[in-house]
């Protein structure tokens, strides 16, 4: 069985712990971290916007790229250590959500953490990238809460209205 | 007519070269010959060109001093220390970190100019967020945004400010007094929009982080920057050019660095960006030629006069649009002579427009944006939709609120 764990800042320990709790033996575990290309590109753009300072050597996006690679390495190190077993490591660069979906091809289980509004149960508990991954994953997905899940009472009560009657104010 | 067309053409060549940067050549390579041509062809009288250079030279020297001062502060470890301070103060909370990044980026931009924030502070902020186990994106974007919208406060914060400061006839103190409220307003509006925009990214806390580094505050650098800042106020009161305060600050750190062999004359000259300074002077001469040959009166008709609120808003919007079409440096050079006729209020409104406007396109202008799109078309073009959306959301409200604040400042302090 091949398990892919999506490592994201802030929420990855919950994913790793979930994999541990599943208690499979002999599984192939993969850890993926995606470096968001947009951040580096935005910094390169900010430097390009400084008119007349055409010195590529000072472009801060170079330093950012180097730093983000070592950040990715360190995160995967920490995740592997927490997992307590060797794992295959994947570092990708680009559009986060698409890279994760592409890497999930052919795996038996993708483990993802919620990363949106964690104060209540509901669709907003998934961030934009996570939403995309859950909606487009070509494999089974295990969706975990990075902290203790909110109680069921956090779901707003259903709107009581007779069947067939439309919600007021909406079309 | 021939002089008019040829000088406009030359300005486009200079700007185009600066955007395209063929073979990575410095922008001055096109700008200096262009300046020579407009003088030789008589499009601008040599005496006028000389007076333009004489007008710009102190501005450029001031800029050089600030650039060197910022680089020396980095060598002293000031920016690393700021990273450690923000990490410590945030205690791993992403919202607290964002607040700290806003404070630090607004202060660094104001005191050591936007170059320092983009080149020196941004990588540090990225590393700080990462070391705390937090997503770096909101904090990095805060730096890139505040490099522009946080540069309203002091005449040294931005090259455009130095140019506007010279044109406005205000003292250093009066300029700062008038721009304090707009600066606070701009940073405040940015902060509110960032909080909403990155709501979800800021919702996830840290996952345990590295122990923050031991705080080794570079005392000398901090003291020199504080004294330089005080020097700006004192020179302004004494009627001396505040560039001397910046030069003194840079000189103190330079002597120290040279004696400790952490810098060489060569590295200091390089930090001063001589080709950039030459580019500014040459661009000034070419713009002067364009103005003297008819554009000046055309812009004069476009720029509203008087410090009424609608006029200030219109001027700021015009400046923001122009900054986005070409870039804020040529935009401010073209607009300033006409704006100066309208008084300091109009000049400062132009400044708000050219400083805040560039956040609309992530590279400061449409021309640069288009060129970069062409360059990267064959490679994987990074998705910049989110960053552009953030710009579109922040720039209009920041512009309106800071112009409103300027209008209030003008009524309170006169000008």
Image (tube, helix red, strand yellow):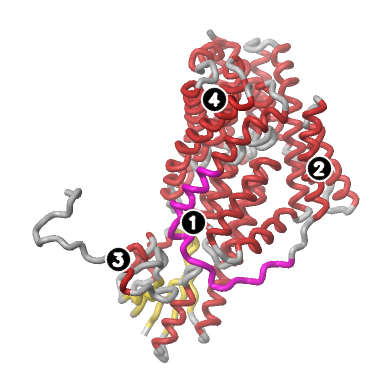
Q: Residue furthest bottom?
A: A25
Give the chain letter at badge 3: A
Q: Quadrant of residue B45?
A: top right
Mark 4 and mark 1 residues within 8 Å of each other at the beta carbon: no
Decide whether residue B209 is among the magenta residues: yes
On the image, the x and y values in percent for residue B322 come to: 50, 27
| Residue shown at the point (54%, 11%) measured from the top left | B297
| Residue shown at the point (31%, 72%) measured from the top left | A153
Q: CA distance from mark 2 to mark 1?
A: 40 Å
- Callout 3 environment at 10 Å: few (<14), some (14 to 19), or many (20+)? few
Query: From the viewer's perspective, is the residue at label 3 or at label 4 nearer?
Result: 3
* Helix, strand or loop status at disc 3: helix
Q: Specify whether A165 is left or right of B181.
A: left
Decide whether residue A58 is among the magenta residues: no
Q: CA distance from mark 3 to mark 4?
A: 49 Å
- Callout 1 environment at 10 Å: few (<14), some (14 to 19), or many (20+)? some
Question: What residue sits right under mark 1 in the picture?
Answer: A37
Query: From the viewer's perspective, is the residue at label 3 or at label 2 nearer?
Result: 2
Q: Mark 4 or 2 closer to N-term?
A: 4
Give the chain letter at badge 4: B
Q: CA distance from mark 1 to mark 3?
A: 22 Å
Question: What residue sits right under mark 2 in the picture?
Answer: B227
Q: CA distance from mark 3 to mark 2?
A: 57 Å
- Residue interval drawn in magenta: B188-214
Give the chain letter at badge 2: B
On the image, the x and y values in percent for residue B162 come to: 68, 30
- Callout 2 environment at 10 Å: few (<14), some (14 to 19), or many (20+)? some
């Amino acid at each position: 069985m091949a398990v892919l764990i999506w490592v994201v800042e802030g929420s990855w320990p919950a994913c790793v712990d979930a994999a541990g709790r599943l208690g499979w033996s002999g599984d192939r575990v993969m850890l993926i971290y995606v470096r968001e290309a947009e951040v580096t590109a935005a910094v390169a753009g900010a430097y390009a916007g400084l008119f007349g300072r055409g010195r590529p050597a000072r472009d801060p996006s170079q330093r950012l790229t180097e730093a983000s690679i070592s950040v990715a390495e360190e995160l995967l190190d920490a995740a592997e250590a927490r997992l307590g077993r060797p794992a295959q490591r994947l570092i990708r660069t680009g559009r986060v959500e698409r890279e994760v979906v592409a890497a999930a091809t052919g795996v038996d289980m993708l483990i993802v953490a919620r990363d949106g509004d964690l104060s209540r149960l509901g669709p907003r508990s998934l961030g934009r990238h996570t939403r995309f991954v859950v909606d487009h994953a070509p494999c089974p997905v295990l969706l975990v809460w990075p902290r203790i899940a909110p109680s069921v009472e956090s779901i707003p009560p259903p709107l009581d209205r007779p069947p067939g009657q439309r919600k007021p104010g909406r079309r | 007519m021939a002089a008019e067309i040829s000088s406009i053409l030359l300005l486009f060549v200079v700007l185009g070269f600066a955007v395209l940067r063929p073979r990575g050549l410095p922008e001055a390579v096109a700008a200096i010959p262009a300046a020579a041509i407009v003088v030789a062809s008589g499009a601008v009288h040599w005496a006028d060109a000389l007076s333009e250079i004489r007008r710009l030279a102190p501005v450029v020297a001031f800029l050089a001093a600030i650039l060197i001062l910022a680089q020396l502060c980095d060598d002293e470890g000031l920016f690393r220390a700021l990273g450690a301070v923000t990490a410590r103060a945030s205690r791993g909370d992403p919202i607290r970190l964002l607040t700290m990044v806003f404070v630090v980026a607004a202060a660094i931009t104001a005191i050591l100019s936007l170059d320092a924030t983009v080149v020196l502070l941004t990588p540090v902020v990225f590393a700080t967020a990462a070391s705390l186990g937090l997503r770096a994106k909101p904090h990095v974007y805060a730096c890139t945004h505040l490099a522009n919208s946080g540069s309203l406060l002091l005449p040294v914060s931005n090259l455009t400010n130095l140019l506007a400061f010279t044109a406005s006839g205000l003292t250093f103190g009066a300029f700062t007094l008038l721009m304090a409220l707009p600066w606070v307003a701009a940073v405040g509006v940015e902060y509110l929009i960032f909080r909403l925009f990155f709501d979800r990214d800021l919702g996830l806390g840290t996952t345990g982080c590295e122990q923050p580094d031991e705080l080794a505050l570079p005392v000398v650098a901090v003291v020199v920057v504080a004294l330089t800042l005080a020097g700006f106020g004192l020179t302004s009161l004494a009627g001396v050019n505040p560039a001397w305060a910046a030069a003194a600050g840079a000189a103190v750190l330079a002597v120290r660095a040279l004696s400790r062999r952490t810098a060489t004359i060569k590295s200091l000259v390089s930090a001063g960006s001589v080709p950039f300074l030459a580019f500014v002077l040459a661009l000034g001469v070419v713009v002067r030629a364009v103005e003297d040959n008819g554009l000046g009166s055309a812009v004069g008709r476009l720029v509203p006069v008087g410090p009424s609120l609608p006029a200030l808003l219109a001027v700021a919007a015009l400046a923001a649009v122009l900054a986005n079409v070409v870039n804020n440096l040529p935009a401010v050079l073209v607009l300033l002579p006409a704006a100066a006729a309208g008084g300091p209020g109009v000049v400062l409104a132009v400044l708000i427009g050219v400083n805040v406007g560039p956040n609309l396109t992530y590279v400061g202008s449409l021309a640069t944006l288009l060129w970069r799109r062409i360059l990267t078309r064959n490679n994987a073009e990074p998705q910049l939709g989110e960053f552009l959306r953030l710009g579109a959301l922040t720039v209009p409200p920041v512009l309106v609120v800071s112009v409103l604040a300027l209008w209030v400042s003008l009524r309170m302090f006169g000008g």
